[in-house]
Amino acid sequence: MLTRELAIATYDRGRLIPDRLTRKSHAQYIDLSQSMLDIYRIGIGKSRRSLHTAVRQLFQGITECPPRRILAFCKLLDDVSQYSDGDRGKTAKLRQAVFRAAAKHHPLVAISDSLFDSEESKVKKQIAEMHAMDWPELNDRLFADLIENHRLKSFRGFDRADALLARYNVAQAQVALFDAVQMTIVARQDFKTILRFAKLARLMHKITKTTNHYVFEFDGPASLLQNTHRYGLGMAKFLPGLLSCRGWTMEATIRGSRFQHTLKLELDDRCGLTSETVPANEFDSKVEESFCLRWGEFPRNGWRLERETEILHQGQTAFFPDFVFVHAEGHRVLMEVVGFWTPEYLSHKSKVLQQFKDQQILLAVSQPLKDKIGHDLNQPKIYYKTVIQIEPVLQALAAIRSQP
């Protein structure tokens, strides 16, 4: 992922337009991208500095290419590379030993004379021999732990040159979302997938339903009082997942210290940005994943576990419970896992659950939230510390089923 320093954008009548490379306007970048990939593919063993230098040389003579664009390409290529760390501990010790040995001969001079007899070349040779090396090899190892001197170990790269360009375009849009204060998505398809990506990115969301679509509202990083950087990364991480979905439009409000006014970033499923992202995990948290794995594929006491197969509607509000328990005799009980969120989101969660108080929803509430949510809710509750235990859930399900 790029950093703010590598962001490139233009502004047009209140809209923020991230830098984008297209076949029509930037045809030469296909060959340049292939050459960049080749540099890294044959660059195993070379330093990060030399690889970046080779990439910069490719762009000599290319007009209208800002330096940040070249640096952005290097960052994206580094993101799919693995470098050695230069064995920091050994390198630091080697450096100390060499400096101590050289200090005894201070000052070093190019040619010794009657006043200064420590000739640089002779001292370097002597120190190198102490470490069973020649000076060029020793000199190369002295600062091997600096990030620019790290050596490329492997490069998984991109399958095609245009895949690198596509990643660049998405990355520039992601950077813009670092300063988003609000995002609205209107979804006509894949709404559950969109919700899943939002949850995986740990985004706070509100959902309403109209006649033929869902509206997702997200509060952005600049609207929070703390953890803004982490939440900004979440907004950026969410975008590739959204781009893999169908039938949506998005409008984000961007506000940053470098902007005098708020700006709009507008995208949709036909905007030309592409992503090969697929859900890496169907679960929103380790707590939910652990519980599902512990429950297993087979029924327990007649109850079968299903994952997000129920959607509740009331007025303009839609609610997607995390789990559904289906009994062999047809009884259905929903379960919602309530973990850590901001106070504002917990308040919203309580209001939504209050709207569906007539539904049989079992709440699995994190212990730290025991005194913060649910006092005015009549839904049954169990509490967990780090994992949701099976037995309390079965007991709660039995109690719910026995109710008239």
Image (cartoon, helix red, strand yellow):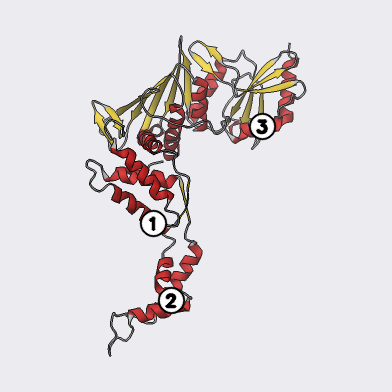
Residue 128's label in the rendered image is 2
Q: What is the C-alpha distance between the residues marked 3 and 1? A: 44 Å
* Residue holding disc 1: 148
Q: Is 131 above or below relative to 358?
A: below
Could you say whether the residue bearing mark 2 is in a helix, strand or loop? helix
Tell which circle, 3 or 1, labels the residue nearer the N-terminal end. 1
Contact, mark 2 vs mark 3 (Cβ under 8 Å): no
Number of marks in the image?
Answer: 3
Residue occupying image coordinates x 74% and y 29%: 391
Visible residue check, residue 366: no
Of residues 379 and 139, the one nearer the viewer is 139
Tell which circle, 2 or 3, labels the residue nearer the N-terminal end. 2
Looking at the rendered image, the disc whose residue lies closer to the viewer, 2 or 1, is 2
Task: Name the residue furthest bottom.
Answer: 114
Task: Name the residue furthest right.
Answer: 301
Of residues 328 and 226, the one nearer the viewer is 328
Res 376 → quadrant: top right
Looking at the rendered image, the disc whose residue lies closer to the viewer, 2 or 3, is 2
User: Which amino acid, mark 3?
Assistant: Phe
Res 286 → quadrant: top right
* Residue holding disc 3: 291
Contact, mark 3 vs mark 1 (Cβ under 8 Å): no
Could you say whether the residue bearing mark 1 is in a helix, strand or loop? helix
Looking at the rendered image, the disc whose residue lies closer to the viewer, 3 or 1, is 1
How many neighbours does mark 1 have within 10 angstroms: few (below 14), some (14-19), or many (20 or more)? some
